[in-house]
């Protein structure tokens, strides 16, 4: 019989999209109630124009978050696997300390450092986000692999599996839920921090939020902020689905 936590997790996978859809409808109704394109406030109308402002910014935001998260996975997962093997395990604390420095620095300061080193543009933002969000995936990969029951590994080796086969057939499948949880965290961090991309020429929905602050217009600020929230909630839900369906059966 499922436990309370398991039932809540199952219901949350249904309730989350309902909440996201509801919030999206509220945003759509609010956006259309503003009469964007016909309202007298020309500056506000321009800031919230879908074709020339919001749509390109949304695409930029998603592109930055997607590439940075993909690169985090490609770097952190193999590195986490390596740091749980024999000799390299000795340097794991040092590597984690370096990875932790990305989040120890203020987000704005981290962007400025990479701006000075690489110049303006989307690539600079992506690299900065990789450094910022690598820790959750790296740490969860190591925790997930270290948490695999040793007796299962011994059983696999007793059946004649090589170390690589044991890793691919036993360790990684059992560690997947923990690794995916780290990826979810990194993804949401990247989506949130991507709002600062405009500061160094990376674009994104931060432009709309900044415009709302500069124009002192709550409508512009709310549309930008809620859109970012919808993106983060949607991708976190997809991460929750992956965590659920990639979980080994019977566990």
Image (tube, grey):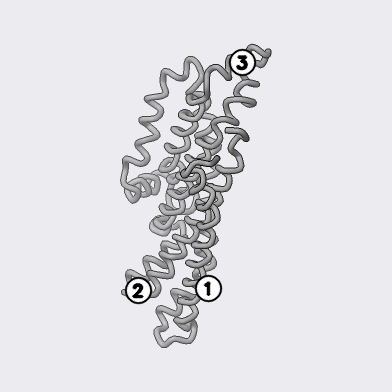
Q: Are marks 3 and 1 in contact (CB under 8 Å)?
A: no
Measured from the top left, where is residue 238 in percent x and y?
56, 51
Q: Which residue is mark 2?
A: 218
For image coordinates 43% across by 70% down, the residue present is 223
Measured from the top left, where is residue 83 in percent x and y?
48, 23
- Going by the picture, which residue comes out furthest to the right? 160
For image coordinates 49% across by 53% down, the residue present is 122
Secondary structure found at label 1: helix
Q: Residues within 10 Å of mark 2 (few under 14, many from 20)?
A: few
Q: Which residue is mark 3?
A: 155
Q: Is residue 54 left or right of residue 161?
A: left
| Vertical relation: 246 (above or below) 81 | below
Q: How many angstroms separate mark 2 from mark 1 (CA)?
A: 17 Å
Using the rendered view, name the quadrant where residue 40 is placed.
bottom left
Return the residue nearer the eye: 220 or 235: 235
Q: How many angstroms separate mark 3 from mark 1 (CA)?
A: 58 Å
| Vertical relation: 132 (above or below) 43 | above
Circle nearer the viewer, 3 or 2: 3
Circle nearer the viewer, 3 or 1: 3
The mark that comes first in sequence, 3 or 2, is 3
The mark that comes first in sequence, 3 or 1, is 1
For image coordinates 36% across by 35% down, the residue present is 100
Q: How many angstroms separate mark 3 from mark 2 (CA)?
A: 62 Å
The N terminus, quarter of image = top right
Secondary structure found at label 2: helix
The image's mark for residue 50 is 1
């Amino acid at each position: 019989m499922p436990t309370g936590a398991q039932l809540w997790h199952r219901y949350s996978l249904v309730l989350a999209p309902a909440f996201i859809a509801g919030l999206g409808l509220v945003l759509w109704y609010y956006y259309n109630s503003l009469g964007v394109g016909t309202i007298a406030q020309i500056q506000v109308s321009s800031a919230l124009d879908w074709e020339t402002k919001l749509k390109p910014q949304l695409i930029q935001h998603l592109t930055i978050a997607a590439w940075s998260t993909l690169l985090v996975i490609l770097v952190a997962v193999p590195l986490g696997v390596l740091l749980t093997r024999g000799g390299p395990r000795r340097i794991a604390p040092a590597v984690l300390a370096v990875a932790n420095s990305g989040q120890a620095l203020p987000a704005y300061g981290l962007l400025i450092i990479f701006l000075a080193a690489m110049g303006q543009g989307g690539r600079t933002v992506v690299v900065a986000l990789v450094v910022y969000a690598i820790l959750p995936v790296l740490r969860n990969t190591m925790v997930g692999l270290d948490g695999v029951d040793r007796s299962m590994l011994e059983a696999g080796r007793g059946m004649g599996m090589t170390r690589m086969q044991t890793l691919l057939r036993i360790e990684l499948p059992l560690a997947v839920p923990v690794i995916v949880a780290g990826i979810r965290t990194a993804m949401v961090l990247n989506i949130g921090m991507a709002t600062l991309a405009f500061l160094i020429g990376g674009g994104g929905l931060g432009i709309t939020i900044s415009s709302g602050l500069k124009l002192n217009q709550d409508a512009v600020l709310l549309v930008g902020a809620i859109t970012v929230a919808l993106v983060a909630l949607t991708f976190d839900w997809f991460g929750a689905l992956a965590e659920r369906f990639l979980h080994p059966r019977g566990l």
